[in-house]
Amino acid sequence: MSNENKEVLLSVKNMHVVFKVGRRRVHAVNGVSFDVYKGETFGLVGESGSGKTTVIRTILGINDLTSGNIYFKDNLISGKLSRRKKRTLKKQIQMIFQDPAASLNERANIDYIVSEGLYNFKLFNTEQERREKVVKALTDVGLLEEHITRYPHEFSGGQRQRIGIARALVIEPELVLADEPISALDVSIRAQVLNLMKKLQRDRDLTYLFIAHDLSIIQYISDRVGVMHNGYLVELADANEIYANPLHPYTKSLLNAIPQPDPKTERFRVRGVYESTDIHYESGEWIEVTPGHFLLGTPEQIKEWTKK
Amino acid sequence: MSKRRELYENANINDLFVAAELRNSESEHLAVEPYSYWASVFKEFKKKPSAIVSVVLLVIIILLSIFVPMFSKYDIVEPNTLLRNIRPNFKYLFGTDRNGYDLFTVVWTGARTSLSIAFIVSIINSIIGIIMGTIWGYFKKLDLVMLEIYNFVTNIPSMLYYMILVYVLDSLEISSVLSLIIAMTLTGWIGLARLIRNQILIITNREYNVASRTLGTPPSRVIIFNLLPYILTVIITSISLTIPSVIGTEVSLAYFGLGLSMETLSLGRILRDAYNSWMADPHILIFPALVVGLITIIFYLIGLALADALDPKTHR
Ligand SMILES: Nc1ncnc2c1ncn2[C@@H]1O[C@H](COP(=O)(O)OP(=O)(O)OP(=O)(O)O)[C@@H](O)[C@H]1O
Ligand SMILES: [Mg+2]
């Protein structure tokens, strides 16, 4: 499939985020650029501390952008925004959090938690309409009407995450940022929540920016994948392409880290240790090596990596 | 590369995860009874014998402070010298004091004054403390100014501060009860405000608050629904500890001859009067001291039990 005639929903251009911790400066995101197309799932993968959460939080305006630009539907959404514009954006971009135990207000009941966005954007005319919307949002994620009066601590982890999904989707956003939404869940219910997210995406034409530090999950859910390391985006391509034809050494090491289901291949799996000190990211350029397949590197490195 | 390609084409989601169907709604039912926060708080509170005993004692103390002074008014003008310093007996449960007054009546009359002042001061300080504390914690721009004020106020020794203030207020034409209340509420709220500010700074960056921000929830609703319920425990514990501390302050001030006027009978004044003669007649000191001690312990125990019961983690 060609990416040219697809509508770009979110565009991140040369994002830099620097945190000041005391006197130290932490360069958490370093010149990251990518587009997210309408209706797709864009997966962002990388090890812990690579800056994935910071990218998402900066898009949402929770962290300050140090330099660069962010566009949503061709409108600049970084920098100073009017109050009204911020509000509209909040309605259009929503987030699903990593830890369902921490991201729900323990002292509020499910009715209030799911209604929060409805109140904020006045998305109902009558009390009855609000309740109907809440019940619909709950049943859409497989929960029941009777749960409306319950409190978060009465639910299991998977149920709580579905409450979090209902809360984000009830206001009908277009873009959903999901920060490792299943990593805190029990292995037995991960697939259930992923399947639910996929189904909701199909039903509502949602766009996902999905974070994981595990390529196997990204492989299952994403159309395109960006690989992050130490605040840099090092490779970006279609999901199939990343798996079939990884070019960057770091991507290869991530792929090798996935345990293989087949015992024979598992035995021969190379658990390569990636030496990040070998590659100086700051001297690299962001180059499209084949259509839709981007790599960060110097021309010499790229020549070497793309050698067949 | 071909080996890997083969691998990924053969790989299947079921190899990576344990398969689980989106279960039918049957399994979503929660087995337990619907949860009500306040009912659970009550249930949890009732479980503690110390809390029950404290509440019963508190009710008795309050009833005695209301009704004893009402029904057994004693004549403050004419001391009865014949009845001085009688030991406790069935007629005079607490004995009599050096003026010949029934100590039982005297102590509960004083307790009425002291408890009333304590309740009023606690309520005023809590209201101001909660409002100032939430504003202080939520609006970062105020932080430096408020910290300066806090440091200034808390660096003055509190006894010295009360002495000066009570002295200054005494020169105004207001009752000594009112001037004591003003002295204790003028800056008395700042400790609770600081406590609430710290709590809010800790919890505003918790993920559920970030979630509210991404949903565009306005500050007023974040404060009421996200922040205050979480610091309710801190607030209630702090209130139940202020009550005995206000009584304690009044007692200390009275010891220095400050605070309430001579006509106003309070626990502080009764204790101060007793210091002179308690060696010969210990009951004059023991009974009022017991009441002060009891009030302090009761509020402390109730505060502890409430702190536990208000925490939803203890519910079931
Ligand atoms: N508010 C902050 N202040 C200072 N440093 C921060 C802040 N947030 C993140 N960082 C730093 O930025 C870097 C990237 O962190 P980030 O949370 O984005 O990584 P991540 O890829 O999401 O990791 P994980 O998989 O563990 O969630 C880390 O070194 C982190 O310590
Ligand atoms: Mg993260």
Image (tube, coloured by chain):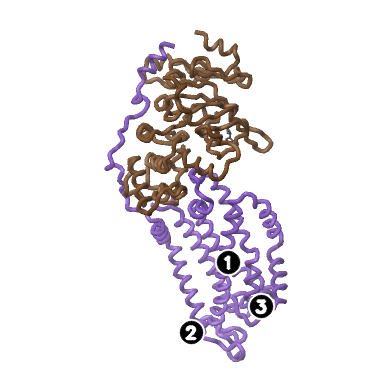
Query: What residue is shown with label 2?
Result: B90
Give the residue type at disc 1. Answer: Ile
Residue B238 pos. (x, y %): 55, 60
- Horizontal side of residue B119 vs B8, given as left or right: right
Q: Earlier in the sequence, mark 3 or mark 1?
A: 1
Judged left or right of residue B182, residue A145 is: left
Q: Is any part of residue B275 visible from this angle?
A: yes
At horizontal 60% and vertical 30% (from top left) the residue drawn is A68
Q: Measured from the top left, where is residue A25 in percent x and y?
A: 65, 33
Could you classify mark 3 by the number of other residues whose Cα lies within 10 Å: few (under 14), some (14-19), or many (20 or more)? Answer: few
Q: Kindly report the distance in space between the C-alpha atoms of the residues bearing marks 2 and 3.
A: 41 Å
Disc 1 beta carbon < 8 A from ligand 1? no
Q: Quick check: do tags 3 and 1 share a chain?
A: yes
- Chain coloured brown: A
* Chain B shade in the render: purple
Residue A288 in the image, given as x and y percentages of width and height: 53, 17
A268 versus B236 height, above or below? above
Spot occupied by residue A122 in the image (x, y as percentages of width and height)? 44, 49
Q: Earlier in the sequence, mark 1 or mark 2?
A: 2
* Mark 2 secondary-structure assignment: loop
Mark 1 or 2, which is nearer the eye?
A: 1
Neighbours of disc 2 within 10 Å: few (<14), some (14-19), many (20+): few
| Inter-mark Cα distance, 1 to 2 | 41 Å
